[in-house]
Image: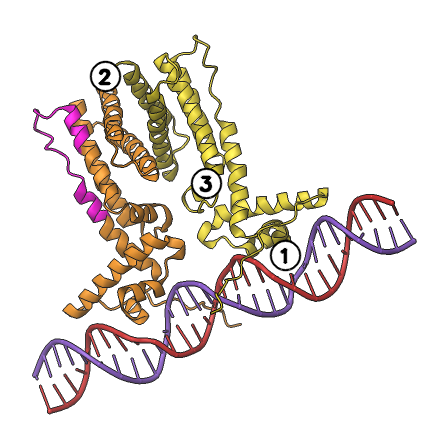
Chain colours: A yellow, B orange, C purple, D red
DNA sequence: TCAAAATGTGACTAGAAGCTCACATTCTAC
DNA sequence: GTAGAATGTGAGCTTCTAGTCACATTTTGA
């Protein structure tokens, strides 16, 4: 019997070569991000993206094999912006206090979530991730930021438990930040103080046993 | 000009009166929960739910005005199960240590997330919430569990900051638990120990200023 | 200048999925 | 027993949307 092969969209698309098409791709991605943020993944459509971008639906499929690949490009760009927002102070500088390190990290994380809150939530919660690798690379780099603070606080390097502590601390901070974002309280100074308190309490408990 | 009124699905449905129909509704909701967990919200279809339940598609629409209302019934039942999994020890019993209270709470939260991990994630992350009120009532009750532990730890009652502390602590615990769930490490004893450590460190820092 | 490559267009197709409705079956109450 | 209510059925209507393709326009390079 003839096996039914469902028609697959072509997965290889041409790369934009001329300046004109590079600009088109940028316009498409930016419009797509706006539509994705506004509608959520469930109601994110390529047709609305095209009309928002002021571009033909065909132009989107010139450069993106399908809807998901468009969302992945958005995620890639967004995660770069997130990492750029999180800078941690020099580890070897002993004059920086634990509180200052924790505050810098938390300010970075809050800033990262403030860039485009709604888009951030949609990308993380709704859009399915086809390619693990890109996401994993981001997560590894993200955890490295936490581990740097933990090692500075514990006064040692690369202990096995530091990796675990980094994941616990990042999970905790992310959890509180996400809850605050849901309630529109990302900019609250009380939240900031409480988060720094939480982080410091945990960091101190690490070196204290 | 005649204004176009887009056809709305009837929002009022009959209630199951006979035992037969009550059983049908239960079968539908249970099948829907399995389909929702397996496919995710994006690919959750009423047709698959009907065939999984061994019921006609029409029967679903006898009792649920639309797809979302079906998901809401699933959420309602699931949140009840979650709350049932979280029991906190008697607040007035002074013989229970801080560690024991924290451990009981965290074991409850982990158990709650273990009931049906995939369904839990889909319900919280993917299914849009139409009716805030039910979700809010759950969240209030959920936070009350945390607040009980915090008040026992701080040795006082209903301080204004306890509400904030409860939200911070619950956000932190949820964040770590969700991260662990994503990595399939919900049952790890290391996670449990680290979470209790985090909770205790924060609780102690509350009474210490 | 002009041919070929790159880019852009949008009407159209296929298929998926929510939901209806006319009809069949089962149960309840008198 | 039987009328009417409750329950159950599923073909198919309708809407939505991802993705195609034949064609038009612009740019490049020789």
**How far is mark 1 from mark 2, CA to CA?**
63 Å
- For discs 3 and 1, the disc positioned in front in the rendered view: 3
Residue A93 locus on image (x, y percent)? 46, 10
Residue occupying the point 66% across, 46% down: A24
Identify the mark at residue A58; answer none if there is no mark.
Answer: 1
Which of the 4 image quadrants contains residue B152? Answer: top left
Q: Could you say which is closer to the camera, residue A118 or residue B103?
A: B103
Which of the 4 image quadrants contains residue A183? Answer: top left
Magenta segment boundaries in residue numbering: B79-104
Image: D10 above or below C23: above
Residue B37 locus on image (x, y percent)? 32, 52
- In the rendered image, residues at marks 3 and 1 fall on the same chain: yes
The chain containing the residue under callout 1 comes to A
Which of the 4 image quadrants contains residue A132? Answer: top left
Residue on which the image places disc 2? B208
Residue C4 locus on image (x, y percent)? 80, 53
Residue A62 visible to the viewer: yes
- For discs 2 and 3, the disc positioned in front in the rendered view: 3
The chain containing the residue under callout 2 comes to B
**How far is mark 2 from mark 3, CA to CA?**
43 Å
- Would you call the spot at circle 2 few (<14 residues within 10 Å), some (14-19), or many (20 or more)? few
Image: B125 above or below B61: above
Residue occupying the point 39% across, 66% down: B8
Tag 1's secondary structure? Answer: helix
């Amino acid at each position: 019997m003839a096996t039914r092969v469902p028609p697959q969209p072509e997965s290889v698309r041409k790369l934009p070569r001329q300046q004109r098409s590079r600009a088109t791709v940028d316009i498409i991605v930016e419009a797509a991000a706006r539509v994705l943020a506004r509608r959520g993944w469930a109601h994110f459509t390529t047709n609305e993206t095209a009309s928002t971008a002021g571009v033909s639906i065909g132009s989107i499929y010139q450069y993106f094999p399908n809807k998901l690949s468009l969302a992945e490009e958005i995620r890639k760009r967004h995660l770069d912006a997130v990492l750029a927002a999180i800078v941690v102070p020099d580890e070897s500088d002993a004059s920086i206090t634990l509180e200052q390190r924790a505050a810098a990290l938390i300010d970075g994380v809050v800033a990262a979530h403030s860039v485009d809150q709604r888009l951030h939530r949609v990308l993380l919660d709704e859009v399915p991730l086809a390619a693990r690798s890109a996401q994993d690379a981001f997560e590894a780099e993200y955890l490295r930021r936490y581990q740097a603070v933990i090692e500075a606080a514990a006064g040692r390097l690369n202990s096995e438990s530091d990796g675990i502590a980094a994941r616990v601390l990042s999970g905790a901070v992310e959890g509180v930040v996400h809850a605050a974002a849901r309630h529109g309280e990302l900019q609250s100074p009380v939240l900031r103080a409480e988060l720094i308190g939480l982080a410091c309490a945990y960091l101190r408990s690490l070196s204290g046993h």
